[in-house]
Image (cartoon, grey):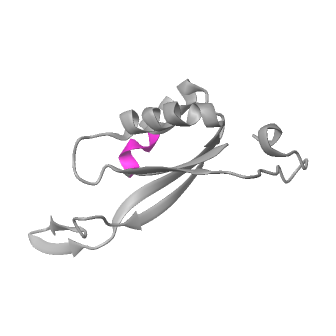
Amino acid sequence: MKLITAVVKPHKLEDVRAALETFGVTGMTVTEASGYGRQKGHTEVYRGAEYEVDLVPKVRLEVVVEDGDSADVVDVIVKAAQTGKIGDGKVWVVPVETIVRVRTGELDGDAL
């Protein structure tokens, strides 16, 4: 099993969620996040005054999938989240050793 974590722009969350649902992903965890990459934030103008935005708002999605589906799920996320502009986000994949469903005690694949 693989844990796929994606950090994307907040306005792309619904597109990514819908694409994952269409692919067959049944569960995900979404959290609000803030951060910056190479651009180290950006400058915006509000009512004529310029100000620095050091931490850019993002959304972090996490899904656990079977090993064979991980490349396809990453591709679905990238295509749905992509705008072609700086700050589109990142996706990374890490192996998962064990999953336990707290309510029932089911393990690994049964816990998905």
Would you say residue 18 is visible in this rendering? no
Residue lying furthest right:
104
Q: Residue at x 13, y 68 (%)?
A: 47
**Residue 30: percent from left, percent from top:** 55, 52
Where does the C terminus fall, quadrant-wise?
A: top right
Please give left or right for residue 80 compared with residue 49 in the image.
right
Above or below 24: residue 83: below
Please indicate whether residue 77 sits to the left or right of residue 100 in the image.
left
* Residue 100 appearing in the image: yes
> Which image quarter: residue 54?
bottom left
- Check the image and report above or below for 107 versus 67: below
Q: Position of residue 95 (x, y in %)?
A: 62, 50
Left or right of 69: which side holds 92? left
**What's the residue at 11%, 73% (across, down)?**
49
Q: Position of residue 80 (x, y in %)?
A: 39, 35
Question: Magenta residues?
Answer: 10-14
Q: 43 above or below 16?
A: below
> Residue visible at 79% across and 44% down?
108
Any magenta on residue 46? no
In the foreground, 37 or 69: 69
Tell me which secondary structure the magenta stretch mostly adopts. helix
> Which image quarter is the N terminus in?
top right
**Total marks placed:** 0
Q: Residue at x 8, y 69 (%)?
A: 48
Indicate whether 44 appears above or below 71.
below
